């Protein structure tokens, strides 16, 4: 008998498992709204033009080699990533108070940040929003932190439970780590307003709570890279410390290249440099050093004015298509006279709509309409097109009536 005979079958990942089920369905009308990846109007994955151009530049450069990167990744990429998220004029960059290390996309950045905190920070509790991206819990628990929730989403209003959020942050112990979605909160699509962010910032600073921003959708929420970075920049401009995990999966369409960065904003360049030395000790035994192709693409785009401008246009086009899908779905439900208030579809921000459909309704839509989504009722607007909106609207209409 196998020495592994006792091993039990593990459950599918709740998000990636949706695609597994979708792939098994032979129906020609099947629709995958589970995956958090952009699709064109034709339902195809998109490689951005600027990415193709950057790859061409890299291929043509015969001086490029495949040597190992340093433990902290490609230096040029790290500098450009910090500028992108904190702003080119950020005093914290000028004062050399930020350490930025290349990590394996957003997930890897969260994990490295989590392990650093578990080793070196006096508070081992991280508060995450209820609900949040499902992977947050395991990433931080396995990093060695203990995970608690703060109230975030109010199912009654399908909006922010701002009062509940402030209450929970107020009662968190001093120094606790607070995970904040920088923009386009996943799965709810509900973000605080800038005024609310300012209140959150004041409260957190007064209680010495440590902000850990997860920025997986910069530029994807509003179509503006600077606009979507506003909350982070508010926290940096007060001079306080914070963490930021960046991903280029969505905004540059580099999902499988696994390219991201972790930045830690410190009070002085001296502290930042010691922090970086410890980050290396976290990374080295985990994966030694990160891959070179993805960050080279990003650096090529970010440092060239023309490519950068072209990227912002392509990014805006993706964001606009998603916003137009919201309107089309909303209109289609109204045209069908579907009972209920569906205005949250056009109010929510980013890649996902948190429909408010329950588990049974989701199962019904999968069974009867071959539409796949996570059981919490989250649908990816990026997976939708003008052609498929009527099918989805029919399914929602049938599920709720
Ligand atoms: N954080 C949030 C909120 C996300 O939605 C995602 C991806 O769906 C990630 C982080 C991590 O993505 P990746 O590791 O592909 O960059």
Image (cartoon, grey):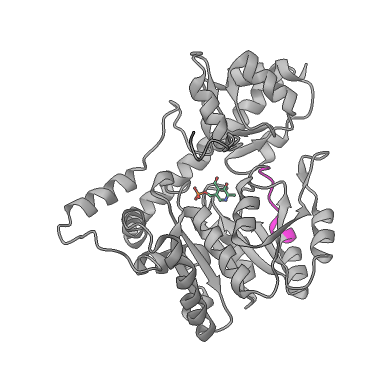
51 vs 64: above or below: above
Judging depth in this view, the residue of 298 and 285 nearest the camera is 285
Q: Residue furthest bottom?
A: 270
Residue 272 visible in the picture? yes
Who's the residue at 49% across and 14% down the image? 26
Q: Quadrant of residue 360?
A: top right
**Residue 125 locus on image (x, y percent):** 71, 64
Residue 95 visible in the picture? no
Who's the residue at 41% across and 44% down the image? 256
163 vs 46: above or below: below
170 vs 42: above or below: below
Name the quadrant of the C terminus: top right
**Residue 364 locus on image (x, y percent):** 69, 18
Judging depth in this view, the residue of 317 and 167 nearest the camera is 167
Q: Main secondary structure of the magenta part?
A: loop
Judging depth in this view, the residue of 196 and 171 nearest the camera is 171
**Residue 47 locus on image (x, y percent):** 36, 40
């Amino acid at each position: 008998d196998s020495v592994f005979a006792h091993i039990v079958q593990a459950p599918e990942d709740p998000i990636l498992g949706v695609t597994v089920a979708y792939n098994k369905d032979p129906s020609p009308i099947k629709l995958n709204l589970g995956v958090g990846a952009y699709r064109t109007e034709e339902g195809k994955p998109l490689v951005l033009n600027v990415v193709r151009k950057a790859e061409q530049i890299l291929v043509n450069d015969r001086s490029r080699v495949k040597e190992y990167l340093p433990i902290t990744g490609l230096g040029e990429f790290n500098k450009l990533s910090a500028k992108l998220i904190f702003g080119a004029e950020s005093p914290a960059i000028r004062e050399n108070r930020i350490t930025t290390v290349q990590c394996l996309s957003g997930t890897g950045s969260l994990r490295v940040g989590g392990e650093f905190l578990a080793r070196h920070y006096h508070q081992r509790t991280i508060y995450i929003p209820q609900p949040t991206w499902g992977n947050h819990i395991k990433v931080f628990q396995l990093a060695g932190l203990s995970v608690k929730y703060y109230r975030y989403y109010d199912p009654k209003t399908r909006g922010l439970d701002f009062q509940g959020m402030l209450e929970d942050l107020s009662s968190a112990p001093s120094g606790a780590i607070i995970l904040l979605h920088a923009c386009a909160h996943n799965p709810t699509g509900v973000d605080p307003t800038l005024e609310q962010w300012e209140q959150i910032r004041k409260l957190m600073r007064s209680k010495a709570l440590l902000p850990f921003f997860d920025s997986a959708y910069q530029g994807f929420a509003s179509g503006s890279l600077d606009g979507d970075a506003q909350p982070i920049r508010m926290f940096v401009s007060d001079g306080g410390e914070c963490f930021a995990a960046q991903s280029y999966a969505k905004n540059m369409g580099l999902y499988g290249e696994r390219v991201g960065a972790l930045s830690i904003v410190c009070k002085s360049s001296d502290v930042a440099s010691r922090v970086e030395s410890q980050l290396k000790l976290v990374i080295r035994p985990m994966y030694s050093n990160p891959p070179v192709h993805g960050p080279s693409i990003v650096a090529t785009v970010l440092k060239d004015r023309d490519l950068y401008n072209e990227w912002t246009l392509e990014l805006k086009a993706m964001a606009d298509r998603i916003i137009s899908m919201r309107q089309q779905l909303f209109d289609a439900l109204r045209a069908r006279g579907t009972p209920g208030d569906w205005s949250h579809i056009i109010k929510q921000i980013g890649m996902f709509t948190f429909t408010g459909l329950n588990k049974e309704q989701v199962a019904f839509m999968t069974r009867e309409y071959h539409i796949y989504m996570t059981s919490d009722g989250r649908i990816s607007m990026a997976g939708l097109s003008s052609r498929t909106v009527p099918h989805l609207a029919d399914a929602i209409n049938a599920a709720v009536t």
